[in-house]
Amino acid sequence: MRADVGNADGDVRLDDLARTARAGDDEAFERLVRAVYARIHRWALVRIGDPDDAEDVTQAVLVRLHRSLGSWRETSRFTTWLYRVTANEASSWRRRVTRRARWIVRDPNALERGVDQLMGPSEEADRTALVELVTAFFEELPPRQREVCDLVDFQGYEPAEVAEMLGVNPNTVRANLFKARKMIRERIEKRGETA
């Protein structure tokens, strides 16, 4: 479940690329979009939950990036600013969709049924099943815990960076991360006891 890992060196390079793009360099802007596209999509997917909808949010963020890159003031890293843009766009999208489609109902047992079908005798099947279980339980986390868990555990950001990205206290990030990990661990242990 490893994704593009955020790191200080990569983020500093993105800062430099964003500065160049903000100065009007179209080629730098195109490189910037290619460099951040997957990251934006992942952030949107974690917040929205549906790949197609996350793609819509990603496109909206890229349009906003083009229009609003000048508002990045370098008081924080570019990725922190971009995360906030993505989070705001995802929240706006969710509010619009909720108003339009209150009738959408998810099947809460679909992921669990899929995991049951993956359980098999081989070690690879067990590993795959565990990954699927973690994914299923991850999807059931409350939104803030899911967001923090994704940024720290799957993308490799430090909790202090995540706190800045989300505009919250670092202790809030650590508490949400602790709760998310605990819930996933307990669900896996419970699942093992019933298997």
Image (cartoon, rainbow, N blue to C red):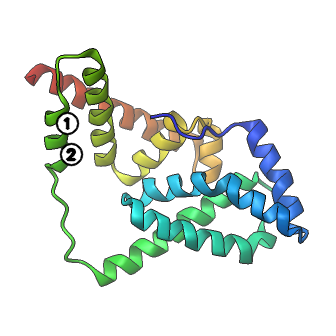
Give the number of callouts.
2
Give me the residue at 37% from left, 57% from top.
Answer: 49
Callout 2 secondary element: helix
Q: Are marks 2 and 1 in contact (CB under 8 Å)?
A: yes
Judge left or right: residue 36 versus residue 12. Answer: left
Give me the residue at 55% from left, 65% from top.
Answer: 58
Q: Quadrant of residue 112?
A: top left
Judge left or right: residue 21 versus residue 104. Answer: right
The local crowd at label 1, few if under 14, some if 14 to 19, many if 20 or more residues have their Cα within 10 Å, is: some
Instruction: Quote the CA–CA distance across marks 2 and 1.
Output: 6 Å
* Residue 167 shows in this picture: no
In the image, residue 63 above or below residue 58? below
Give me the residue at 65% from left, 42% from top.
Answer: 161
Viewport quadrant of the C terminus: top left
In the image, residue 116 above or below residue 19? above
Image coordinates for residue 148, horizontal then vertical, percent: 48, 44
* Residue 22 shows in this picture: yes
Callout 1 secondary element: helix
Viewport quadrant of the N terminus: top left
Judge left or right: residue 65 versus residue 87. Answer: right
Image coordinates for residue 160, horizontal then vertical, percent: 64, 39
Q: Quadrant of residue 128?
A: top left
In the image, residue 57 above or below residue 45? below
Q: What is the three-letter code of the residue carrying label 1? A: Val
Judge left or right: residue 53 versus residue 77. Answer: left
The local crowd at label 2, few if under 14, some if 14 to 19, many if 20 or more residues have their Cα within 10 Å, is: some
Image coordinates for residue 85, horizontal then vertical, percent: 62, 66
Q: What is the three-letter code of the residue carrying label 2? A: Leu
- Which residue extends farthest bottom? 100
Residue highlighted by disc 2: 111
Image coordinates for residue 27, horizontal then vertical, percent: 84, 64
Residue highlighted by disc 1: 115
